[in-house]
Image (spheres, rainbow, N blue to C red):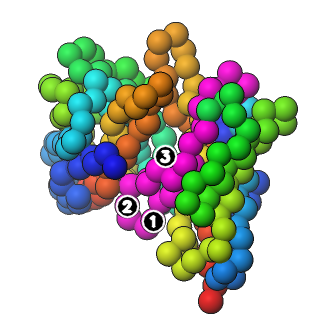
């Protein structure tokens, strides 16, 4: 099956610093990737859609200057949490869309746990 | 607004029994539905999907049923095993023009007892 990786798997940082999370599709090319956020015991909430070669599309209520997304290649998207604060602590999950036959499937990464002190 | 919801937040079943996890969706225009399994501290894992032109699809030990009349989706797991213990999410794929995105339900925790 399709493999999506994330790096780092967990990170602890001080308040005010920026953190970059990478999402890679290892065995397929993905023109579209997605970034989700998940709080404990809650569902996944879509933050933004990352499009290769163009600007990301952010969901309502998500600050684009706070969560910078770059989709530099067909296998890599990055999410940078700028000036992180404790309320940004969460589980960040990316997914990559792969075209399959007549349809498409999203494959998810293992997630990145961010703790802001 | 559009939503995908689940009837039961927690389901406890005995090992070997069949499990049924239900999901209601509200967007009648959704054309694709997926069930994901998420273990603690990990990302969602694809289980099975179904397109809106189908009402049933079977995989290995899993079956997804789609009832478009009442906007209901279910996941059936046969002979539930301890390794099936996880949170299960249904997701619907909605389209706006050429763009599509998944909307996740609230999740059901499946607990398998010995």
| Mark 1 → mark 2, Cα distance in angstroms | 6 Å
Which chain does tag 2 point to?
A: B
Q: Which residues are magenta?
A: B27-50
Crowding at mark 1 (Cα within 10 Å: few <14, some 14-19, many 20+)? some
> Which callout, 3 or 1, points to the residue nearer the camera?
1
Question: Is B54 placed above or below B40 here?
Answer: above
Subunit bearing disc 3: A
Badge 2: residue crowd in 10 Å (few <14, some 14–19, many ≥20): some
Query: In terms of image quadrants, where is residue B19?
Result: bottom right
Residue lying at 24% horizontally and 36% vertically, measured from the top left: A28
Q: CA distance from mark 3 to mark 2?
A: 12 Å
- Report the residue marked by disc 2: B42
User: Please, which chain is the residue tagged with disc 1 on?
Assistant: B
Q: Which percent across, then down, holds residue B52?
A: 67, 30
Query: For the residues carrying marks 3 and 2, which lies nearer the camera in this image?
Result: 2
Q: Secondary structure at mark 1?
A: loop
| Residue at numbered disc 3 | A44
Helix, strand or loop status at disc 2: loop
């Amino acid at each position: 099956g399709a493999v999506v990786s994330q790096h780092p798997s967990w990170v602890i940082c001080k308040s005010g610093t920026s953190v970059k999370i990478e999402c890679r599709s290892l065995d397929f090319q993905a023109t579209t990737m997605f970034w989700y956020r998940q709080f404990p015991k809650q569902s996944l909430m879509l933050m933004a859609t990352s499009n290769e070669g163009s600007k990301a599309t952010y969901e309502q209520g998500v600050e684009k200057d706070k969560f910078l997304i770059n989709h530099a290649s067909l296998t890599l998207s990055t999410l940078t949490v700028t000036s992180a604060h404790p309320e940004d602590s969460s589980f960040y999950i990316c997914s990559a869309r792969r075209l399959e036959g007549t349809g498409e499937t999203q494959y998810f990464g293992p997630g990145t746990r961010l703790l802001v002190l | 607004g559009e939503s995908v919801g689940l009837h039961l937040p927690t389901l406890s079943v005995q090992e070997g029994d069949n499990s049924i996890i239900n999901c209601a969706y509200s967007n009648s225009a959704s054309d694709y539905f997926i069930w994901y399994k998420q273990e603690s501290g990990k990302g969602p894992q694809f289980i099975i999907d179904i397109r809106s032109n189908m009402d049933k699809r079977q995989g290995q030990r899993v079956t997804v049923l789609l009832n478009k009349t009442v906007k209901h989706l279910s996941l059936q797991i046969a002979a539930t095993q301890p390794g099936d213990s996880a949170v299960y999410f249904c997701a619907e794929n909605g389209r706006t023009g050429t763009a599509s995105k998944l909307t996740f339900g609230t999740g059901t925790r499946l607990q398998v007892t010995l």
